[in-house]
């Protein structure tokens, strides 16, 4: 069996005396669409920050491709990240945003950078937006542009924070199709944080569920199997969109 | 139409009965509250609230009734809401969380000594952070010298334009006015002693050594420093800084370094302009108020103002530029919590920078006074 792409061992995360999750253990295998799910405030986005090296664990460790993502590196980043809001740089055009990592980390001539940028934007369905400012884009378009930027350096691992949040069902479904295509056709390993059920069943191949009350991972596996077979009332409540007391 | 009428009866076995009628809603809430409280005055062992004649109740009425029951039960008085029709019972069930109202959280009063101590610790922590940030910037500058390609040069000229060229009108006007004010204030005194010509000495030296660099730095702090802090604060709260980090761009070399270099380059240029405009303000007063000739004023200025006065002002201006960038960027990058956090950090950036500018000015002034004697 191949080594896992991400290994999380006894991870405890939070701030000062506030622990969000305790002793989390899981792995992400190459080629998966791995979904981190759970209710609001359970620490999904915080876990993503730990996986991408933006936050320091209170205890335990995170390894992405065998390396601590917090370790300073002179190498190009080994993964791409799409933030919840897109986090495009507001003073740069969409094309400049996508081209930024290419200009920094490659020696491609300007024309080649433009060609790659245009191809990436075409891939995410944003042709002819190269010269547009992020403020002129809709929420869904910003997320697509952010995915294009995250993919600029051809990573084999991409992190997506709430890709469907705040989007209409059609745009959300289109974004899911894009994620599926990236996974199947480009072989990208995708780690997604979300609590949108439709999206979870459509794209997820495996998931973990975080629980706010017990501050632990309460379920791990195929989301469809968990929906149909889990006996845990918290898991069933989540997947069946019902308050816990109505299921018990 | 909202209405509520009540009938409160205290029975001999210490059971109070409150009979409510009509429609209970937000508008009749006060009357309902008072009626319920009235029943408590008899110190009953039990309160029965009869809802059989209540035709409808809204959420606020349900909240009042259920919290009243919870409150009484917490005091050891049994309370029952009886006879509710189905529509009223439904909304009561929805609002009945069977919990006693918790006491209103009160912020514990802090002693003055505690507050002074906390404030002092906060200042020390901020100072420590600024010093640490300065250390990072020094390391960043050394790396930039070693590998100039890593600096985001693209931002340099636009930043210099915004901080420098765009500030020319306001810097020129303020320094002209300050030069004029200084000369007007001193004109009468100098004239009394027949020392009109020394107006050029007074204005020239004070403007070139102190007023020009300092006023320019204050203007730049208010204009550009606040803009730096707000820009980086917004980027921080919008996750743009995190996005840069995940792409392998440190904010120091990508955002802070170009700003620092731009400001350190434009500050001396703005200061030269400020010196000229301040002296021009003095010249205007000298000509209009003291009838001095332009040639005489300029000749005296040239004699009085030494090159060392001019260079000391320029050296100070570079240090001011560095301090403005350093503090504004550090405060901006420390922003958390959305728009409010950005506002707080922008205010803190301006206040801290102004204090630091005066401090740096004092240190430099002492240094330039002492240095020639050593």
Image: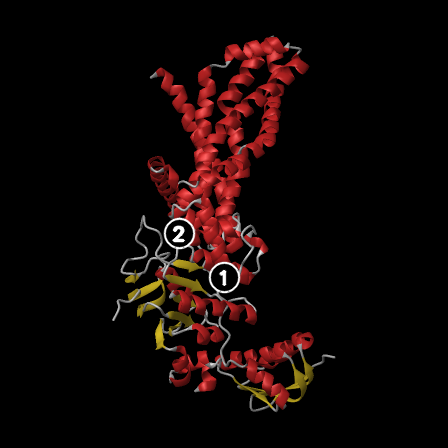
Q: Is residue B296 above or below residue B366?
A: above
Front disc: 1 or 2: 1
Q: Mark 1 lies on which chain?
A: A
Q: In the picture provided, is B55 more to the left or to the right than B299? A: right
The image's colour scheme reads: secondary structure
Label for residue A136?
none
Q: Which residue, given by chain and number where applicable, does mark 1 sit on?
A: A124
Q: Name which quarter of the figure residue B223 lies in.
A: top right
- The Cα atoms of the two marked residues, 1 and 2, are separated by 23 Å
Q: In which quarter of the image is the N terminus of chain B?
A: bottom right
Image mark 2: chain: B
Where is residue B76 shown, x and y percent of the image? Answer: 48, 82
Report x, y in % for residue B131. Answer: 36, 40
Quadrant placement of the C terminus of chain B? top left
Residue drawn at (59%, 27%) of the image: B172
B324 vs B181, nearest the viewer: B324
Vertical side of B255 occupied by B209: above or below = above
Q: Horizontal and vertical percent for residue A131?
A: 55, 50
Q: Can you give x and y, in whole percent of width and height, for residue B206 in the image?
A: 52, 20
| Of residues B18 and B55, the one drawn nearer to the viewer in this rendering | B55
Q: Judge left or right: residue B364 versus residue B275.
A: left
Q: Count numbered badges in the picture.
A: 2
Q: Residue B245 carries which label?
A: 2
Q: Nearer the viewer, residue A215 or B243?
A: B243
The secondary structure type at the circle numbered 2 is: helix
């Amino acid at each position: 069996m191949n080594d896992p792409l991400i290994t999380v061992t006894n991870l405890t995360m939070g701030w000062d005396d506030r622990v969000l999750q305790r002793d989390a253990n899981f792995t992400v295998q190459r080629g998966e669409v791995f979904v981190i799910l759970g209710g609001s405030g359970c620490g999904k986005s915080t876990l993503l920050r730990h996986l991408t090296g933006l936050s320091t664990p209170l205890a335990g460790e995170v390894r992405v491709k065998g390396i601590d993502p917090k370790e300073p590196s002179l190498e190009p980043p080994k993964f791409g990240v799409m933030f919840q809001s897109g986090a495009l740089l507001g003073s740069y055009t969409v094309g400049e945003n996508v081209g930024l990592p290419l200009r920094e980390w490659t020696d491609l001539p300007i024309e080649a950078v433009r060609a790659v940028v245009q191809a990436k934007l075409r891939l995410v369905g944003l042709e002819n937006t190269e010269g547009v400012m992020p403020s002129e884009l809709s929420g869904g378009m910003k997320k697509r542009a952010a995915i294009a930027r995250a993919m600029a350096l051809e990573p084999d691992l991409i992190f997506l924070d709430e890709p469907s949040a705040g989007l209409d069902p059609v745009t959300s479904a289109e974004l899911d199709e894009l994620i599926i295509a990236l996974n199947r056709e480009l072989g990208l390993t995708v780690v997604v944080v979300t609590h949108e059920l439709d999206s979870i069943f459509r794209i997820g191949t495996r998931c973990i569920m975080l629980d706010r009350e017990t501050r632990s991972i309460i379920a791990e596996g195929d989301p469809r199997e968990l929906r149909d077979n889990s006996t845990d009332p918290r898991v069933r409540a989540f997947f069946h969109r019902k308050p816990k007391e109505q299921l018990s | 139409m909202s209405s509520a009428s009540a009938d409160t009866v205290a029975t001999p076995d210490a059971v109070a009965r409150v009979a409510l009628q009509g429609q209970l809603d937000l508008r009749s809430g006060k009357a309902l509250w008072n009626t319920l409280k009235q029943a408590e005055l008899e110190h009953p062992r039990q309160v029965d609230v009869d809802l059989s004649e209540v035709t409808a109740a809204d959420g606020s009425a349900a909240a009042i009734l259920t919290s009243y029951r919870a409150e009484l039960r917490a005091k050891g008085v049994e309370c029952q809401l009886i006879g509710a029709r189905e529509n009223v019972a439904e909304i009561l069930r929805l609002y009945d969380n069977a919990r006693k109202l918790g006491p209103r959280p009160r912020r514990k009063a802090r002693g003055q000594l505690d507050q002074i101590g906390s404030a002092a610790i906060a200042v020390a922590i901020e100072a420590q952070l600024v010093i640490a940030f300065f250390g990072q910037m020094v390391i960043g500058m050394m790396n930039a010298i070693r590998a100039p390609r890593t600096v985001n040069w693209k931002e340099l000229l636009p930043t210099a334009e915004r901080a420098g060229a765009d500030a020319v009108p306001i810097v020129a006007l303020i320094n002209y006015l300050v030069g004029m004010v200084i000369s007007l204030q001193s004109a009468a005194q100098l004239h009394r002693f027949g020392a009109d010509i020394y107006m050029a000495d007074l204005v020239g030296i004070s403007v070139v050594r102190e007023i020009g660099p300092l006023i320019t730095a204050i203007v730049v702090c208010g204009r550009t420093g606040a803009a730096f802090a707000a820009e980086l604060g917004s980027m921080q709260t919008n996750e743009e800084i995190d996005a840069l980090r995940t792409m392998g761009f440190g904010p120091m070399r990508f955002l802070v370094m170009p700003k620092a270099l731009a400001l350190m380059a434009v500050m001396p240029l703005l200061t030269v302009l400020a010196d000229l405009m301040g002296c021009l303000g003095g010249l205007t007063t000298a000509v209009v108020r003291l009838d001095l000739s332009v040639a005489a004023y300029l000749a005296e200025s040239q004699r009085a103002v030494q090159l060392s006065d001019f260079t000391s002002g320029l050296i100070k201006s570079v240090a001011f530029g560095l301090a403005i960038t350093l503090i504004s960027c550090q405060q901006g990058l420390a922003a958390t919590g959305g728009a409010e956090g950005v506002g707080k950090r922008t205010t803190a950036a301006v206040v801290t920078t102004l204090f630091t500018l005066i401090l740096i000015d004092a240190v430099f002034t002492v240094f330039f006074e002492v240095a020639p004697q050593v």
